[in-house]
Image (tube, coloured by chain):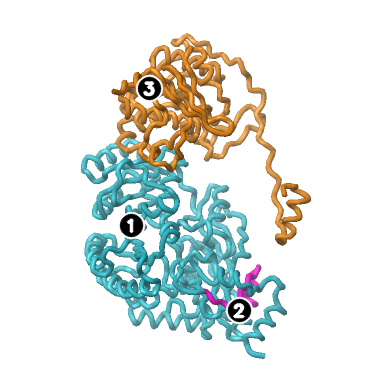
Chain colours: A orange, B cyan
């Protein structure tokens, strides 16, 4: 028999890498005009995994996002994919990783999920810290960089089989994770924090009925003050700058010249 | 010295040394398009860099009565760019300059060899758009787009290429250069010769440069994919979408036969739990958010769609488009398709398709037929796949017979035997199904007026 699971997932609002991202000339941040936003792709994978687990085990999924009212877009997207309800921590202004982990810890204490599944990092600042802080502060087990043996073209993926395996007693989770040079498997006692890597699954497209239904699903509003978390940043961004532009390539007249340049100039062969 | 040798030595004397090539690989590559019916056999490839050089080639071709086949991105599907009879292939690929954008007049001057997608990228930087858009835009060239009056996925919103060309520079078979209409939006001064060259498939003159008309890039678009039961539902959904709370910018359909090939070749699948026999890709602009929900709700209530999705990001939108745009390529990569590209008045499509089914079941019992197309324009791509056990020759023979029946049906419903692919070599035997004797005679008279020696793309269209 399978035990019902309650799973908490995150849906950070990040800049869509398909829009043109430019650094402000004064280096204080990026130019917000013309940007599009989406769910952090790693979080989207977390949402997908949670939905697969709950489809198998029954139970409930809850999605959390932190930010201004605009993060409702990402919460609705997760709910359109199938998440049952949303928690919105209303906060505008900069947040560092410790503040985010602190807020999520409080939400976990309130919601008491069996598992929290998060993206291993968000594609805006690529920190890869929140899941680890959170697990440590909650005193939970952690399995980072969750992946799976099967490829994304496998039948297991096509049939939307969850990659995370919950023990028969509902008290543990087995996680295949990416490590240097291969895959390792860890088992955690639940509740636990799992962070997702890119090859865990292929997130679903939100079905239209789900998109419509998501509009009436509940979003609960919380605040850092209400949760009792001091979110004053301990990290300060001093300066942001764009990577140096790539030098223009050159054209070579023939293969012989190409080979010669690869040998003597690029020194790659 | 015979006339070919005289032509060759004159070319070499008057043009830079690297203009001509007789390399076997070059000849095989440049001698054909995306059709695989005709074996390429050109004698020479010339790649001029300027209009003046094109003019020189044509003057010499006229003087020595040498046949010339114009060649763009060679993504055509009717054999219009095939050189199978020892012709000279004139490639425009070295003439790909894209000029500065006229942001007030909304136009840009480009050379014929500019790649369609490169023009799109250039215009996008100014927030503008040349709305000629189709699956092969990464290879096709503007000159070919114009010479074939290309259609594609945005016709329902923007019309054909014909509507987006302000001016043309054309080299006549004699070598004379014509400047037609420049950048003028309005110019009612007699017969519009420019329009004669658009869609002429290179039989009247060589397009060397064009002034393209631009529009603003579309704002936010929404991309939907629907799973529906049958073609009837595809058409019914279209009539509902026509009145929907948005501007339709694309309405495309395809069947599960197409997606099976797509999965085999590209590993892509429609993102639905249950498979369906027919799919519709719909793109809309300026959706009225308040009215859209009830509209969508009703589709499900009325049982018009089985399932559906709306892209939540640019990446997902591209993913849905890939399902449609990957089809043509996947069919050719996984088998040998016989392609037909027909157009019907949209209100006749339902009845036409019912009759078509019976043609297929008698002519091709058990064969795999992949249907897709710009259904919103009444345009169907009918792809018959070669069965394993049949030889290529036997396959062409059978499809040729069946085409006669298919085209009689097209004629009966006042359709066109070539909606957007053109006539080229492939559809030439069937042109009479769509054009009257008088029309054909007038076309021949035009051809004779522009190309009295018949040296330009001979054997094509007429």
Q: Find the residue positioned furthest to the bottom.
A: B1
> Disc 1 and disc 3: Cα gap in Å?
51 Å
Q: Which residue is mark 2?
A: B58
Quick check: B398 left or right of B125?
Answer: left
Q: Which residue is mark 1?
A: B375
Secondary structure of the residue carrying tag 2 is: helix
Q: Which quadrant holds residue B65?
A: bottom right
The reply to the same-chain question for discs 1 and 2 is yes
* Residue drawn 32% across the image and 72% down it: B403
Q: Are marks 1 and 2 in contact (CB under 8 Å)?
A: no
Give the image location of residue A194, x and y in percent.
46, 23
Chain letter for mark 2: B
Q: Which quadrant holds residue A24?
A: top right
Quick check: B390 left or right of A38?
Answer: left
Q: Which residue is mark 3?
A: A167
What is the magenta range?
B40-59
Q: Which quadrant holds residue B18?
A: bottom right
Placement of B148 over or under A175, stated as above or below: below
The first of marks 1 and 2 along the sequence is: 2
Give the image location of residue B94, x and y in percent.
63, 65
Residue A60 within the segment the image draws in magenta: no
> Disc 1 and disc 2: Cα gap in Å?
41 Å
Residue B57 within the segment the image draws in magenta: yes
Residue B449 visible in this rendered orientation of the protein = yes
> Disc 3 and disc 2: Cα gap in Å?
78 Å
């Amino acid at each position: 028999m399978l035990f019902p699971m309650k799973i908490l997932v995150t849906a950070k609002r990040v800049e869509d890498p398909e829009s043109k991202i430019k650094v402000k000339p004064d280096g204080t941040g990026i130019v917000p005009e013309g940007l599009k936003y989406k769910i952090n792709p790693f979080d989207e994978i977390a949402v997908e995994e949670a939905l697969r687990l709950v489809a198998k085990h029954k139970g409930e999924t809850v999605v959390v996002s932190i930010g201004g009212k605009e993060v409702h877009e990402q919460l609705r997207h997760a709910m359109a994919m199938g998440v049952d309800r949303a928690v919105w921590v209303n906060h505008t202004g900069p947040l560092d990783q410790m503040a985010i982990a602190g807020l999520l810890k409080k939400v976990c204490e309130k919601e008491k999920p069996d598992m929290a599944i998060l993206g291993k990092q968000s594609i805006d600042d690529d920190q890869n810290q929140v899941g680890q802080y959170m697990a440590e502060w909650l005193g939970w087990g952690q399995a980072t960089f969750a992946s799976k043996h099967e490829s994304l073209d496998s039948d297991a993926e096509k049939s939307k089989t969850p990659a995370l395996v919950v023990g028969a007693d509902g008290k543990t989770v087995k996680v295949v994770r990416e490590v240097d040079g291969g895959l390792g498997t860890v088992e955690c006692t639940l509740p636990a924090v799992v962070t997702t890597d890119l090859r865990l699954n292929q997130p679903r497209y939100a079905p239209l009925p789900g998109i419509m239904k998501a509009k009436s699903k509940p979003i609960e509003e919380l605040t850092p003050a209400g949760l009792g978390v001091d979110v004053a940043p301990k990290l300060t961004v001093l300066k942001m700058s764009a990577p140096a532009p790539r030098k223009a390539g050159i054209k070579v007249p023939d293969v012989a010249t190409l080979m010669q340049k690869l040998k003597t100039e690029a020194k790659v062969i | 010295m015979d006339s070919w040798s005289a032509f060759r030595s004159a070319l070499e004397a008057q043009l830079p040394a690297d203009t001509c090539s007789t390399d076997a690989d070059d000849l095989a590559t440049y001698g054909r398009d995306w059709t695989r019916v005709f074996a390429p056999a050109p004698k020479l490839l010339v790649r001029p860099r300027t209009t003046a050089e094109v003019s020189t080639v044509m003057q010499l071709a006229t003087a020595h009565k040498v046949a010339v086949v114009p060649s763009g991105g060679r993504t055509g599907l009717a054999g219009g760019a095939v050189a199978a009879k020892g012709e000279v292939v004139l490639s425009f690929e070295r003439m790909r300059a894209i000029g500065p954008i006229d942001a007030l007049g909304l136009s840009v001057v480009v050379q014929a060899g500019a790649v369609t997608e490169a023009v799109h990228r250039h215009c996008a930087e100014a927030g503008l758009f040349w709305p000629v858009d189709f699956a092969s835009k990464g290879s096709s060239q503007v000159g070919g787009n114009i010479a074939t009056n290309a259609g594609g996925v945005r016709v329902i919103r923007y019309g054909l290429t014909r509507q987006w060309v302000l001016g043309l520079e054309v080299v006549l078979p004699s070598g004379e250069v014509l400047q037609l209409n420049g950048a003028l939006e309005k110019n009612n001064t007699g017969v519009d010769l420019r329009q004669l060259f658009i869609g002429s498939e290179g039989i009247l003159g060589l397009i060397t440069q064009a002034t393209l008309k631009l529009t603003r890039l579309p704002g936010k678009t929404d991309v939907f994919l629907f799973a529906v039961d049958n073609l009837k539902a595809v058409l019914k959904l279209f009539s509902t979408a026509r009145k929907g709370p948005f501007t339709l910018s694309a309405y495309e359909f395809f069947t599960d036969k197409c997606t099976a090939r797509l999965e085999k070749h590209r590993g892509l699948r429609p993102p639905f739990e249950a498979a369906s026999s027919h799919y519709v890709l719909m793109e809309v602009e300026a959706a009225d958010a308040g009215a859209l929900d009830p509209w969508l709700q009703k589709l499900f209530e009325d049982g018009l769609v089985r399932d559906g999705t709306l892209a939540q990001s640019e990446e997902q939108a591209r993913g849905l488009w890939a399902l449609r745009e990957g089809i043509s390529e996947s069919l050719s990569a996984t088998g040998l398709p016989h392609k037909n590209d027909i157009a019907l008045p949209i209100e006749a499509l339902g009845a036409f398709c019912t009759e078509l089914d019976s043609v297929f079941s008698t002519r091709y019992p058990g064969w795999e037929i992949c249907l897709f197309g710009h259904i919103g324009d009444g345009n169907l791509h009918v792809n018959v796949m070669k069965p394993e056990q049949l030889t290529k020759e036997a396959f062409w023979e059978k499809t040729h017979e069946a085409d006669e029946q298919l085209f009689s049906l097209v004629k009966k419903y006042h359709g066109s035997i070539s909606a957007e692919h053109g006539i080229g070599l492939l559809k030439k035997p069937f042109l009479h199904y769509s054009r009257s004797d008088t029309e054909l005679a007038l076309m021949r008279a035009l051809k004779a007026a522009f190309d009295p020696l018949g040296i330009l793309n001979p054997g094509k269209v007429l």
